[in-house]
Amino acid sequence: MLTVGFLGLLVGLLLLVILFALGRVFTLEIAFIRLAWAPVAALALQAALWGPMTRALGYAAIAPPLVTCLVSFFFGIVGATLLAGRPRSEWHPRLFRSTLLAALPGALLAAYLVVSVLRFIGKN
């Protein structure tokens, strides 16, 4: 599990480097809006290819969705930081929607963890 965490950290940092590199060409907000769909698209692709992925990876098939959700946490933090840097009256609706979209897989992971802990506590 530690390896998956480090892999998620590396992939997240790589995407943040790409985001900041695109921030040199565009503004950082525009670059974030253009990359915000990546975690959701990756999770959808992994869900569509779940059967072949489990046959090829076995128990390790949980690693790609977990890494995607960890990267989504990074993107949610970056989007929230971009939103917090401006007064609420100057928020762009596309930036807010992109932040919610980018944070969706991370929110799904958090909901899954909360439900799992609550079910475990309920059994004891």
Image (cartoon, rainbow, N blue to C red):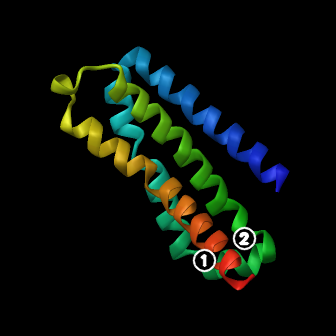
Question: Residue placed at 50% from the left, 63% from the top?
Answer: 108
Q: Which residue is mark 1?
A: 50
| Residue 35 drawn above or below residue 83 | below
Say few, some or many: other residues with alpha carbon within 10 Å of mark 1 (under 14 / 14 to 19 / 20 or more).
some
Residue 55, x across and y down, in percent: 74, 81
Residue lying farthest left? Answer: 89
Residue lying farthest top? Answer: 24
Please, what secondary structure does the residue beneath circle 1 have?
helix
Query: Marks 1 and 2, Cα distance to the nearest angstrom?
Result: 8 Å
Say few, some or many: other residues with alpha carbon within 10 Å of mark 2 (under 14 / 14 to 19 / 20 or more).
some
Residue 8, x across and y down, in percent: 69, 46
Horizontal side, residue 30 vs residue 81: left or right: left
Label 1 amino acid?
Answer: Trp
| Residue 118 drawn above or below residue 34 | below
Q: Quadrant of residue 84?
A: top left
Pointer 1 or 2: first along the chain: 1
Residue 29, x across and y down, in percent: 33, 26
Question: Residue placed at 70% from the left, 68% from the top?
Answer: 62
Please, what secondary structure does the residue beneath circle 2 have?
helix
Question: Residue placed at 71% from the left, 38% from the top?
Answer: 10
- Looking at the image, how many numbered discs can be counted on the residues? 2
Residue 66, x across and y down, in percent: 65, 59
Q: Which residue is mark 2?
A: 61
Are the residues tagged 1 and 2 within 8 Å (C-beta)?
Answer: yes
